């Protein structure tokens, strides 16, 4: 059974009104800055993790002009620990372009929004639908799952042609413009709380009697996506040089690469390479190795500690940062944890 445009959208709108999420800090507003910030932060990140970061960002940068005027290092410092740091760099660039190109006001259409750094098709559509009521479909991970199941869409979403077809099917289900904010939120809420990847709660789903996957008895088989990125592993050695006054030696990571643009301990591919960078006569001790998990890679990190007088300089770019300075820098989460420890 295929849901009708009116029937499916109406179910989602009514369900969201009575059962959806209403207490998240970026809800109940049509402020494009706040909606945009939440959408970027929520990319591949759980709501529970985003909440504290969102509050800190909006407290420090009340609007797009404040963010545009900030130093990138401060933006990265506030983002530290949230991961996917290209999002933070694009966030900063996007704010600057909104000010430079649009006078500090976000454009009102998804097509224009998509021209900004870090804003893809689904994020642009979410901003346009939430803030300006544009009749445009979103297709983030949660919504893909909901619609693929409802439509029993068996196209392989590892294939661009199938994704484009699902976009078209999503657009055909859109309600009238005035219902767009609640409909869009409803799809997101349904995917986040009911139509879960595993063990979906079909009995409380507002679309249960028109859901093709449920009627087939195999909702967990949707969406179909055959291509999986292979996990890899890498070992890195971290030189933790520190002075008696609490200063640590840090340098800014180059781009592209892991932790690009962030301040970091010097990183080496082997213990031998690290030893070659040590000042003559210094005594280094190995700390406990630990694993840091990225999306598609496991980093096995090996800290090596050395105490140096602050007047000494290590090879290559970098500098000493005092105990009152380095906590405010943009640091990768495992490096911050290591230094805090």
Image: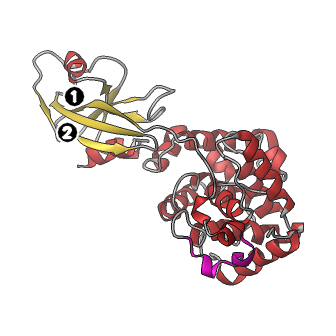
Using the rendered view, name the quadrant where residue 259 is placed. top left
x and y, in percent, of residue 47 in the image:
53, 63
Residue 103 can be seen in this image: no
x and y, in percent, of residue 194 in the image:
59, 73
Q: Nearer the viewer, residue 133 or 77?
A: 133
Q: Nearer the viewer, residue 271 or 77?
A: 271
- Label 1–label 2 contact, CB within 8 A: yes
Q: How many C-alpha atoms fall within 10 Å of the one at disc 1: few (<14), some, or many (≥20)? A: some
Q: Residue under circle 2?
A: 245
Give the structural element (helix, strand or loop) at label 2. Answer: loop
Position above or below: 100 against 16: above
Q: How many C-alpha atoms fall within 10 Å of the one at disc 2: few (<14), some, or many (≥20)? A: few
Residue appearing at x 55%, y 52% in the figure: 44
Q: Is residue 208 magenta?
A: yes
Give the structural element (helix, strand or loop) at label 1. Answer: loop
Give the magenta-colored segment's residue range.
Answer: 200-211
Total numbered circles:
2
Q: Residue under circle 1?
A: 310
**CA–CA distance in space, label 1 to label 2:** 8 Å
Residue 152 can be seen in this image: yes
271 displayed left or right of 109? left
**The N terminus, quarter of image:** bottom right
Residue appearing at x 62%, y 44% in the figure: 91
Position above or below: 202 against 164: below
């Amino acid at each position: 059974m295929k849901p009708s445009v009116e029937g499916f959208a109406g179910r989602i709108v009514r369900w969201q009104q009575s059962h959806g999420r209403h207490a998240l800090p970026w809800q109940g507003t049509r402020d494009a800055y706040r909606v945009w910030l939440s959408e970027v932060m929520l990319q591949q990140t759980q709501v529970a993790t985003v909440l504290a970061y969102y509050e800190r960002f909006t407290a420090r940068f009340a609007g797009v002009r404040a963010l545009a005027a900030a130093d990138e290092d401060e933006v990265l410092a506030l983002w530290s620990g949230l991961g996917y740091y290209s999002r933070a760099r694009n966030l900063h660039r996007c704010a600057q372009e909104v000010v430079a190109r649009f006078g500090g006001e976000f454009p009102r259409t998804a097509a224009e929004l998509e021209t900004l750094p870090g804003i893809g098709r689904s994020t642009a559509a979410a901003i346009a639908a939430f803030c300006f009521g544009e009749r445009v479909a979103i297709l983030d991970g949660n919504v893909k799952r909901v619609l693929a199941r409802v439509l029993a869409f068996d196209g392989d979403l590892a294939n661009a042609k199938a994704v484009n077809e699902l976009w078209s099917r999503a657009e055909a289900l859109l309600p009238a413009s005035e219902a767009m904010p609640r409909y869009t939120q409803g799809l997101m809420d349904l995917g986040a709380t009911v139509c879960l990847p595993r063990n979906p709660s079909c009995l409380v789903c507002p679309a249960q009697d028109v859901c093709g996957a449920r009627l087939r008895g195999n909702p967990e088989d949707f969406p179909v996506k055959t291509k999986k990125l292979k996990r890899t592993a890498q070992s890195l050695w971290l030189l933790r040089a520190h002075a008696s006054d609490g200063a640590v030696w840090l340098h800014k990571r180059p781009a592209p690469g892991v932790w690009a643009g962030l301040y970091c301990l010097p990183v080496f591919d082997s213990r031998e390479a690290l030893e070659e960078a040590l000042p003559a006569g210094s005594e280094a001790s190995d700390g406990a190795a630990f694993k840091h998990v990225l999306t598609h890679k496991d980093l096995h990190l090996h800290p090596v500690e050395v105490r140096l007088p602050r007047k000494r300089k290590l090879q290559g770019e970098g500098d000493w940062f005092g105990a009152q300075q380095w906590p405010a820098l943009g640091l990768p989460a495992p490096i911050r944890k290591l230094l805090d420890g």
